[in-house]
Amino acid sequence: MHVALWRVMCDMKMIPFKPNIQSIRPYEPGKPIKELQREYGIRNVTKLASNENPLGRPSTDVLRAMRKAIREVHLYPDGSCYYLLERLAGEIDIPKDQIIFGNGSNEIIELVARGFLSEGDEVISSEMSFLVYPILTQVCGGRFKAVPMTKDYRYDLDGILAQITERTKLVFIVNPNNPTGTYLTAREMDAFLAKVPPRVIVCFDEAYVDFVEAADFPRSLSYIREGRPNVIVLRTFSKAYGLAGLRVGYAVTSREMTEYLHKVRQPFNVNLVAQAAAVAAIEDKFYLWKTKRLVKTGRKYFYKKFKQLGLEYLPSQANFVLVNVKRSGSEIFQELLRSGMIVRAMGAYKLPDWIRVTVGRRSENAQFIRLLKACLTEKT
Ligand SMILES: Cc1ncc(COP(=O)(O)O)c(C=O)c1O
């Protein structure tokens, strides 16, 4: 063996890689459009894979605010997100010292994990929820407990309660859930919170809350207004507000919790352009309205078409629909990819026959149905 290579191998053994981190299976994001264009040489690519905004462009007011902000990027951003905080606090009627922003809500999940988990601590969520939770738990040396869903693909709250032990620090509940689109009602959530020991922190991840139509959906911010110290509500500008590429999310929680999480974050965690864009996004009510309307009609369109195709689907409160394609979901995913359509296979969630499709523009939804139909009829 070459001496230099032998040396490198010896050195690698001496690097103190942590086993809990080395054994992590990295999060697989939806395939980027540019990657598919490169790999398959396809020009026209449609991405209905990452639950991004269906309008296919940001708000023009947001673009204007970004153009203005960009002239100042030689400066550090405002570490306190002053204007954004002011605007959002007014919008959701929550005191400013009970809101904290992150580089996407993903960063807040990380702040919570780093802030509360020590070696051997437990985190509980469902087996079909955001894959970032188990990853961050493992990064912090914790133990992730994935509770099976109920038969109707909803969180099993009693199952979660039964798993709580002395070592449990965090419970994550996505509502409405990704990837199922199902939701928990206000009554279910109230009953659950009444039974959770107050030392266990409950994070309600509401990345998709803006798309909810159900009248019995919980008003989670009222848990914060009531002064429950162990509740954190996570929200994002990535979906309905169309800022996924800029990375802005936030948490609403108690004063004490907000102060604590600020100690964990980087001083300039939300960039200057993103802050200006998020303020403009809050102001542009018409963009939000159009987004919601498109999602509502898109979901209905998918339901109708899936019914016609004889496919089982889960009615969704989010901007995506989970459908059982009665074949290998990853095969269908690959076939759709070759036609320039990116969706998500659900193997990672132990749903091998299902795919998740994000609601897009009308023409994109119709294109997806056409291609899916072609995939399904080819094999029969
Ligand atoms: C349930 C859930 N939580 C959080 C996020 C992350 O959102 P953000 O873009 O704000 O980091 C996503 C994104 O897909 C999500 O599905």
Image: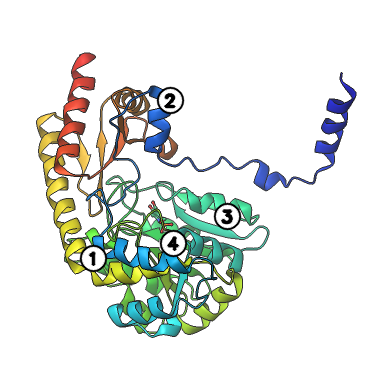
Q: Which residue is mark 3?
A: 137
| Helix, strand or loop under label 1 | loop
State how far apart marks 2 and 4 are (Cα).
Answer: 30 Å
Q: Which residue is mark 1?
A: 217
Direction from residue 261 to residue 22 in the image, left or right: right
Instruction: For label 3, count other residues whose C-alpha is less than 10 Å away and answer few (under 14), some (14-19) or many (20+).
Output: many
Give x and y (percent) for residue 7.
Answer: 88, 31
**Who comes first in sequence, dot 3 or dot 1?**
3
Q: Residue at x 21, y 33 (%)?
A: 368
Question: Pointers 3 and 4 in contact (CB under 8 A)?
Answer: no
Q: Please tell me in which quadrant of the rendered image residue 94 appears.
A: bottom left
Quadrant where the image shows the C terminus: top left
Q: Which residue is mark 4?
A: 105
Q: Please tell me in which quadrant of the rendered image residue 66 appears.
A: bottom left
Q: Residue at x 38, y 71 (%)?
A: 193
State how far apart marks 3 and 4 are (Cα).
Answer: 16 Å
* Camera-nearest label, 1 or 4: 4
Whether residue 306 is situated above or below residue 197 in the rendered picture = above
Specify the amino acid type for callout 3.
Answer: Thr
| Helix, strand or loop under label 2 | helix
> Which residue is outermost to the right?
3
| Helix, strand or loop under label 3 | helix
Quarter of the picture for ligand 1?
bottom left
State how far apart marks 1 and 4 are (Cα).
Answer: 21 Å
* Camera-nearest label, 2 or 1: 2
**Who comes first in sequence, dot 3 or dot 4?**
4
Whether residue 281 is situated above or below residue 253 in the rendered picture = above
**Who comes first in sequence, dot 1 or dot 4?**
4
